[in-house]
Image: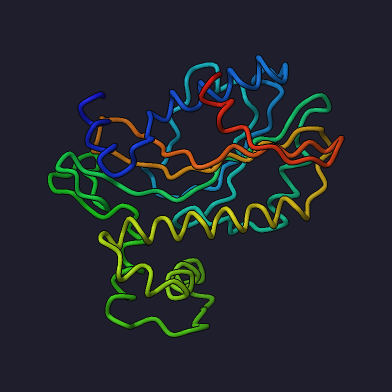
Amino acid sequence: MQPYLDIVRTIYPNAISTSEGVDHLLNLLDNTFNLAPHQVMAADSICSDDLNLIEYPKRAYEMLGPFKMGGLNGFPFTGLTGMSAFAHHVPADGAVFVFHGPHIGISRAGVAGDVLRPGQHIPSSCCGAARAALARLQHNEIKKFDLTDLDYQMNTIEQIFLAQAERILNAASPIVEATEVMYEAIEKRIDLLASRTQYPCRYVFLMGAIMINADHEAGSFASTRRLHLLDNSTGTHTDLLDQLWAA
């Protein structure tokens, strides 16, 4: 694990293993908020890619859910209906936890946007949708406002990239920058959905990260960007990221 983590950290210096990150979260919920895993209604807005099975430590499987909000590259395509639906599944004495973010592969060779999948012998794209949208952007093939019923999720990613075309195309690593752009779009949409949802509980935790897929059997990692707390009893918003790492 450590040699691969060193490779990942050349691109994402604060990356840790996914299971370690979840352990930090559960420690924080227990020690600071007196919340056990079985009291937490979890949702995730991550890519529907088959690689994206979050590697939870054993106790995390006691959490309820997860409710799946994400489509291609993690954008919360289930929208307001999805956020509202799962929010009302929370236990009366519990809390809501939403994990959100895009994903990107990093191969053993340190190539961003590539990963060796199970049963394959050469690396392939990860996130495939992001790489495809980036290729279309680089070839000037995306038209503004071009959204179709046939490929709505992919078209949405293309429009997100098109709006930040100069930033992405001029970056040292366009795929890494495109992933950053996607993270920002996902976080913005999650916050909007959360602001328009009534939660029948006191605490709502929103955890944002870039998920990092490694070559087959090497595990996965996360570059955490925020842990945001909404306290519905007071209407206050709190940044818990420093407390997360201390947990």
The location of residue 142, given as percent across then percent down, is 39, 81
Q: Is residue 149 above or below residue 192?
A: below
Q: Position of residue 159 (x, y in %)?
A: 48, 74
Q: Residue pushed farthest front?
A: 242
**Image quadrant of residue 216?**
top left
Q: Which residue is at the front of the view, 75 or 71?
A: 75
Is 217 placed above or below 134 here?
above
Tally the numbered discs: 0
Q: Say left or right for 159 vs 15.
A: right
Foreground: 137 or 56? 137
Q: Quadrant of the N terminus?
A: top left
The residue at 54%/52% (across/down) is: 70
Figure colour scheme = rainbow
* Location of residue 95 by image quarter: top right
Q: Report whether 188 appears left or right of 219.
A: right
Image coordinates of residue 102 in percent, x first then y, are 45, 51
- Towards the viewer: 236 or 107: 236
Q: Which part of the image, by quadrant, shows the C terminus?
A: top right
User: Is residue 5 toward the left or the right of residue 227 in the image?
Assistant: left
State the residue at coordinates (49%, 75%): 150
Name which residue lies at 46% across and 58% down. 72
The percent coordinates of residue 90 (x first, y second) are 76, 33
Q: What residue is drawn where x is 83% and y is 42%?
A: 235
- In the displayed structure image, the side of residue 227 where residue 221 appears, left or right: left
**Nearer to the camera, 217 or 14:** 14
Vertical order, 1 against 108 (above or below) = above
